[in-house]
Amino acid sequence: MKIAIDAMGGDNAPESVVKGALKARDEFSDLELVLYGDKTAIEKYITDQTRITIVNTTEVIGMNDEPVRAIRRKKDSSLVVAANAVKAKEADALFSCGNTGALLTAGLLLVGRIKGITRPGLLSTLPVVSGQDGAFNLLDSGANADSKPEHLYQYALLGTYYASNVRGIKEPRIGLLNNGTEPHKGSKVTQEAYQLLAADENLNFIGNVESKDLMKGVCDVVVADGFTGNAVLKAIEGTALAVMSLLKDTIANAGAKGKLGALLLKDDLKSIKGRMDQAQYGGAVLLGVKAPVVKAHGSSDDLTVYYTLKQIRTMINEEMVPNFTKYWQAQQAKEALDSKDAE
Amino acid sequence: MKIAIDAMGGDNAPESVVKGALKARDEFSDLELVLYGDKTAIEKYITDQTRITIVNTTEVIGMNDEPVRAIRRKKDSSLVVAANAVKAKEADALFSCGNTGALLTAGLLLVGRIKGITRPGLLSTLPVVSGQDGAFNLLDSGANADSKPEHLYQYALLGTYYASNVRGIKEPRIGLLNNGTEPHKGSKVTQEAYQLLAADENLNFIGNVESKDLMKGVCDVVVADGFTGNAVLKAIEGTALAVMSLLKDTIANAGAKGKLGALLLKDDLKSIKGRMDQAQYGGAVLLGVKAPVVKAHGSSDDLTVYYTLKQIRTMINEEMVPNFTKYWQAQQAKEALDSKDAE
């Protein structure tokens, strides 16, 4: 398999991107990586080019570039050239740590939507921290600011394929993010989405879930409109960081007794940080397009890049996109037939 | 001043409600409290009836009662009789730890909306935990599932009066919850709301804010539609609880060294819990109705009830509702005049 990598995206590019790619290449013998970017800058970090191809590009899309304009105008940017390789089926997936909006736009306009998927959504993976070890997926976590009930329904299908194919969960539990658990609760959009989700027998829909219960592992996949999903994702991340930084400040300002206590507790506190670390789950995945399009955090280090390439490899090996597309096309065909019968 | 208290609402009612009320009565000599509920059950906890009136009621609205139906049918419930006392101006504010939906409905239907405020919103207060000590207000945190731009604008005005009158903040910084900080970001609703907020020179509008920055104190008041506001509120609460419970579990499962460390660090860890405690700020306030209508958590203890009565007392003493109403009416009159001039 071949993964197209935007080597110039992210705060630590190209160094962390290249080093993470090499680590993945060394571990997985089925991995071929194509690095797009400034060839000279990339080569600095590579001695062994086994299963590594470098494609020189002359432009870079920055964090502050307006996404649609950047994709249209910067034709020789590392991201656009990488995306075009996926479009031309020269590569199986697209990966970047750069400008999120630009990557989403490249996914939509260049890699292209699966027919009938009107609004591809971004799937994030977050840790479950109470009770059992684990994780949950949240989508749409920010690709679309306005969503309709049918988009939420499509997210439930897409999320089911991600959780079963990539995370190996049999019949993943799908929850609908809402402001109460009762079926009648919510906005007009969630009330209608509830009906669509409940009507599909192939979905393991467990009903409405509240954001306060997500980290308890109440479901495997939670679907939400992209505006609320994004706000919840950032609230969870921001709160976890704020509490951990409060803990750090408290220890820094503690007396001798407290400081000694913190020293003795150090390894245990580290395990908490590890448990909450999102990097282990890879990046955020744009679902509903014709190939895996994956975004890792702008501040990603080597290890995060490695984990994300590992995640992409699983998506390709498990044929997540083809499996979903086959199911989706069959379902669409059946619906077309049913509506014809009804005439 | 007189506060009407639903003594039967909440998990620990009437005991915690009554005990908290007595504590507030003892501390504030200007406070007269009217307790509505089962007279016999309430009297058990009272020896000194100074500035306490008990009004016997025969019904209770439970946590699972459907709000509108309960308010319409349970005419002799502690909540309805208390709300009617506020409506009749026999009391200055309404307080309950019971069914949130029922209290909101009582606020809307019995206490009544301020003329021109189409959708009263629920204001919550949350701690700022990084950097300086402090708090921020979030509204609407869940009164309405669907909101229009003009509702968000009204929340900004209402929140300004709360933060300045109750928290003593001069020109409170108002942020608009959005999925990016750039002015053009967001959903149709937030894009339009941004324009309304930016156009009002009397507001100290600082622009879009993201949920990840709220606990850093990026603004004093954040306005949001009630669906997203509720999801963010619960995500923050849920994450803080999850991290604290992870910390607790980690200590419980630590070896002898870690356990000793935790013991030495105990007081410091307690201070973290104190810093994140919401109870100190009182309850959630329904803003946009003719008198303070305040909800404390169902699991409130004596101290939370006491803090909430203290908060209500400030609202009454500072004349928050009359001050807002005066400003709002003048603004409405000016607008009417302007639109007449324009004809």
Image: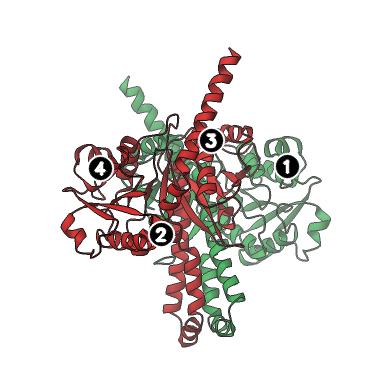
Chain colours: A green, B red
Quadrant where the image shows the C terminus of chain A: top left
Q: Nearer the viewer, residue A70 or A209?
A: A209
Q: Is residue A332 visible?
A: yes
Instruction: Find numbered disc 3 in the image and state the secondary structure of the residue it sits on.
Output: helix
- At label 3, the amino acid type is Tyr
Please say if the residues under marks 3 and 4 sit with CB atoms less than 8 Å apart: no
Residue B187 horizontal/vertical position (percent): 55, 36
Residue B199 horizontal/vertical position (percent): 63, 32
Task: Give the vertical position of A334 relative to A138 (above or below).
Answer: above
Image mark for residue B307? 2
Specify which label sits upstream in the sequence, 3 or 4.
4
Q: Is residue B106 left or right of residue A285?
A: left
- At label 1, the amino acid type is Asp
Residue at image coords 61%, 51%: A295
Residue linked to disc 3? B153
Instruction: Find numbered disc 1 in the image and state the secondary structure of the residue it sits on.
Output: loop
Please report, as a chain letter, where disc 3 is located: B
Please say if the residues under marks 2 and 3 sit with CB atoms less than 8 Å apart: no
